[in-house]
Image: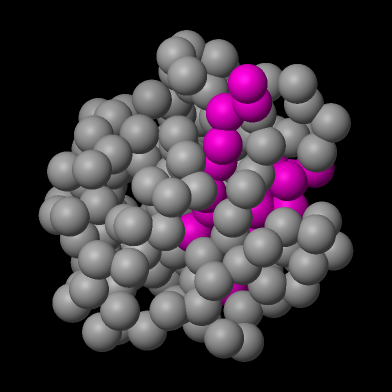
Amino acid sequence: MKKRIAIFASGSGSNAQKIMELFKHSQEAEVALVLTNNPDAYVLQRADNFEIPSHIFDRKEFYESDTIVEMLKNMDIDLIVLAGFLWLIPKSLTDTYPGRIINIHPALLPKFGGKGMYGERVHKAVLAAGETEGGITIHYVNENYDEGEFIYQAKYRIDKGDNLEMVQFKGQQLEHQHYPRIIESIIKKIKK
Ligand code: GAR
């Protein structure tokens, strides 16, 4: 029986795209649901293109009701993947899916993490700090921003003169290269 993945994303969803591509023909797992807090998120279009159902929710539903947890249980979700999802995961979710929620962060945690550190802001902070290398961190999710156990990190070099676009590009290349395959290796270890 195929294992089932739910992706949470708030924006473009380029990582979600790579993940949906990988699992489209997988015997091991499928992306069963895409969830977002943002009705304008391009990830919704991407989900449609793969004929994957999606669900849009607001703060009240996410933090003050059980509907998301119930939906994930009813849909028999085995792994939750955050791909550019910007809200803190509530305890009800981390309690229901211990060790089954993972995130990608566009920096070498524990540096450049925490509340408010997402997307472009992270890359700007990395550049402002004069770092000579950047990277990505894939980690388990707990109730605090960017604090769960690390699963994988990869680095890129920041050359003199690299601007925001360049650093973003290098980081995104690493994310697309590694996130789907790391998810695949985690999925293989899950017993259904
Ligand atoms: C990615 O770079 C991801 O690492 C970052 O949001 C971007 C989403 O891009 N996540 C965070 O910053 C979480 N703190 P995408 O929508 O194109 O996949």
Is residue 154 visible from the viewing direction of this image? Answer: yes
**65 and 162: which one is in front?**
65
28 or 102, which is in the foreground?
28
- Classify 113 as above or below 157: below
Question: Is residue 142 shown to the viewer in this render?
Answer: no
Q: Residue at x 82, y 56 (%)?
A: 50
Position of 121 with respect to 169 (left or right) is left
Residue located at (68% from left, 72% from top): 44
Quadrant (top left/top right/bottom left/bottom right) for the N terminus: top right
The image quadrant of residue 117 is bottom left
* Left/right of residue 13 with respect to residue 151 in the rendered view: right
Q: In the image, residue 134 lies at what x, y percent?
A: 48, 43
Coloration mode: one colour
x and y percentages locating residue 118 in the rendered image? 40, 65
Q: Residue at x 77, y 26 (%)?
A: 26
Q: Quadrant of residue 49?
A: bottom right
Q: Please state the horizontal and vertical placement of residue 171, each as a whole percent of the image.
A: 60, 48
Residue 49 vertical position relative to residue 17 in the rendered view, above or below: below
Magenta stretch: residue 5 in it?
A: yes
Residue range of the region highlighted in magenta in the rendering: 1-21
Residue shown at 35%/34% (left/top)? 100
Residue 75, image x and y in percent? 50, 48
